[in-house]
Image: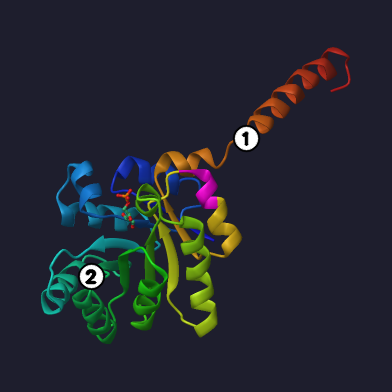
């Protein structure tokens, strides 16, 4: 399973990238706002740091306008992927961008039938949005499992990207289901390194090693 970071914060991206475990980045207008930087500048800066795909959102509504916007954004760097909305116009744009060789991430997907429609446009990614579904009482684990099954049943190429993840349990749900990619906030990514028993066990070995030295056995 690939791991992306869902942020436009350059320092977060550098920290995660330094681990060697980061496969890509997703952003959205809220993340750009949080970064305090101009949209094109921050996407360019991210693309200079991260080799993998960097999703940047087109905000136009009509397919033709989404495509115009996407062509400009995709010009920033070869690893840019354009986020289009899970709407009639967004999926029309997805087909049009595919023709132009521009990579697409269909976003704001909350239901299995939306996953099917999005995958039929042959995008690079389809983003299912986990915590926002959870907030309204939706069945997150069912959506995760169904998305993987739909992709497998019909042999679609698009990768299923689980977005808006706010806890480790959902990351594990995604791994078990065979989700292609999770995009995470920095805190969840770094939390994945930790377990209380890891810390406890390592402390115990530190003490034991001191005693090894004291006993002249080192
Ligand atoms: C992921 O690609 C999007 O940025 C994400 O769905 C939005 O996440 P949020 O629910 O944390 O805003």
- Give the labeled residue for mark 2: 74
Q: Callout 2: 10 Å neighbours few (<14), some, many (20+)? A: some
Q: Which residues are magenta?
A: 167-171
Q: Is residue 169 magenta?
A: yes
Judging depth in this view, the residue of 97 and 212 nearest the camera is 97
The answer to whether residue 49 is left or right of residue 181 is: left
- Give the labeled residue for mark 1: 195
Q: Label 2, label 1: how many angstroms apart (C-alpha)?
A: 40 Å
| Residue drawn at (50%, 69%) of the image | 146
Q: Position of residue 6 (x, y in %)?
A: 35, 51
Quarter occupied by residue 217: top right
- Image quarter (top left, top right, bottom left or bottom right) of the N terminus: bottom right
Q: Is residue 148 magenta?
A: no
Callout in the foreground (2, 1):
1
- Image quarter (top left, top right, bottom left or bottom right) of the C terminus: top right
The answer to whether residue 16 is left or right of residue 114 is: right
Q: Main secondary structure of the magenta part?
A: helix
């Amino acid at each position: 399973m690939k791991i992306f970071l869902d942020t436009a914060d350059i320092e977060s991206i550098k920290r995660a990238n330094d681990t060697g475990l980061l496969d890509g980045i997703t952003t959205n207008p809220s993340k750009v706002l949080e970064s305090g930087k101009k949209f094109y500048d921050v996407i360019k800066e991210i693309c200079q740091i991260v080799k993998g795909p960097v999703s940047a959102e087109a905000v136009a509504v009509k397919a033709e306008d989404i495509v115009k916007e996407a062509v400009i954004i995709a010009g920033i760097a070869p690893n840019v992927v354009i986020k289009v909305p899970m709407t009639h116009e967004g999926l029309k744009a997805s087909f049009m961008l595919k023709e132009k060789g521009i990579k697409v991430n269909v976003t704001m997907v909350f239901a299995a039938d939306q996953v099917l429609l999005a995958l039929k446009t042959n995008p690079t990614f389809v983003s299912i949005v986990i915590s926002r579904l959870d907030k309204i009482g939706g069945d997150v684990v069912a959506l995760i499992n169904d998305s993987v099954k739909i992709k497998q049943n019909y042999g679609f190429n698009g990768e299923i990207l689980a977005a808006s993840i706010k806890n480790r349990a959902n990351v594990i749900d995604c791994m078990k289901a065979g989700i292609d990619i999770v995009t995470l906030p920095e805190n969840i990514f770094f939390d994945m390194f930790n377990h209380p028993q890891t810390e406890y066990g390592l402390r115990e070995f530190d003490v034991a090693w001191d005693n090894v030295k004291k006993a002249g056995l080192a």
